[in-house]
Image (cartoon, grey):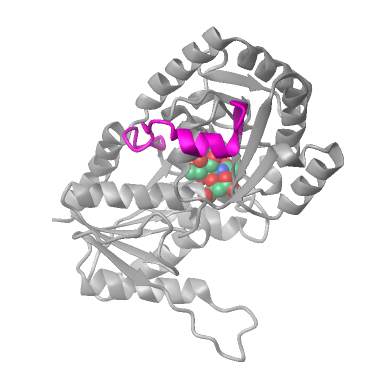
Amino acid sequence: MKIGIVCYPTFGGSGVLATELGKALAEKGHMVHFITYQLPVRLSGFYTNIFYHEVRVPHYPLFDYPPYETTLASTMVDVILNNDLDILHVHYAIPHASAAYMAKQILKKKGKHIPVITTLHGTDITLVGKDKTFEPVVAFSINESDAITAVSENLRKETYHTFHIEKEIDVIYNFVDIERFSKKPLDAFKKVLAPQGEKIITHASNFRKVKRVHDVIEIFKSIHQEIPSKLLMVGDGPERPEAEEICRALKICDDVRFLGKQQEMEEILAISDLFVLPSEYESFGLSALEAMAAGVPVLSSNAGGLPEINLHGKTGYLANVGAVEEMSALAIGLLKNEQQLASMKEEARKQAKRFDIQHIIPHYEKLYERFVNLNL
Ligand code: GMT
């Protein structure tokens, strides 16, 4: 199949997922065309079956707001026609689903039918999408997609609850490449970050408010009081200055490392003992799944789709959003009990295997085939 993929090319989960999906489809022999404003972060290197088309927004003095959606729709039309694509798969509703609708209408006039699949990732529904300034367009363009998928059962329910959706939403869970995350810990790396063999606690996110990074630091402060430990903060975003400020106020700066955006997450996870994700909401929590794939138990909130991935008392722990004391106590109990820690590591990996890329990709292929065959 010739598949167009539209996504955000950044470190966010939706972009990572879309890029990994494209790479896996290309490996299976499909021709994959990425249409984005910049090379996706997980797409470095050269792949025989992958093509990259950049969306260029012209700068013109009249535009206070560059019309990205218009240029995106035009690029979609151009790429679909010139490469005779079979299907277009857009990740994240805003503005990808509405641009896809526009492209589809233009192509129809030109005699080309292109089925559009929209995958909802979370914030496009639960935070941004339901804002009145977006809602009518988001609801319309989701409904106009030929198929809609959500990355968890929770997101599926949230979408029905938030919008008037007339179509069936299929749940296709996010996935992880287990092999990639099966790295042996690099002793030298561990020595640099935890020279005295301290326990390593890790958090990774885009440091937005929804991630509650202040909770991560408070939880770590409690752990640190009882157990020699280091905190690795991976990623970057608007809450980082405040997070650093809290570390200074709590006088734990020497044991907290802000590593910024990192490509080699598997190396960091390989040396981690616990992954902390206390988010206000997560439709899925791809970073938690990646941690589990590396055999790292997860301490998370029970918000959104997290309980579908992290199993309380088995692969890690879940607690209510903001229950910092409870989360701290659970973490301390676990880190003090080597036997339980080892068993949770094992269970985390086992659970992650259920979401292995090899199991999930065929679901997308089957979905595409439903529409591409119709088209023949
Ligand atoms: O979490 C973010 O801020 C990034 C966001 C995105 O759109 O990239 O992540 C969402 O999609 C990921 C991939 O499906 C999910 O794993 C995240 O849980 C989801 N984030 C939220 O729902 C807050």
229 or 287: nearer the viewer:
229
**Residue 181 shown in magenta:** yes
Along the horizontal axis of the image, is 94 left or right of 196? left
Instruction: Please provide percent x and percent y for residue 74.
Output: 38, 76
162 to 146, vertically: above or below? above
Main secondary structure along the magenta-highlighted residues: loop
- The span shown in magenta is 172-201
307 or 231: nearer the viewer:
231
Along the horizontal axis of the image, is 80 left or right of 135? left
219 or 27: nearer the viewer:
219
Instruction: Please provide percent x and percent y for residue 76.
Output: 35, 70
The residue that appears at 65% across and 82% down in the rendered structure is 64
123 to 279, vertically: above or below? below
Q: Quadrant of the rendered structure where residue 212 is?
A: top right
15 to 294, vertically: above or below? below
> Is residue 239 in view from this perspective?
no
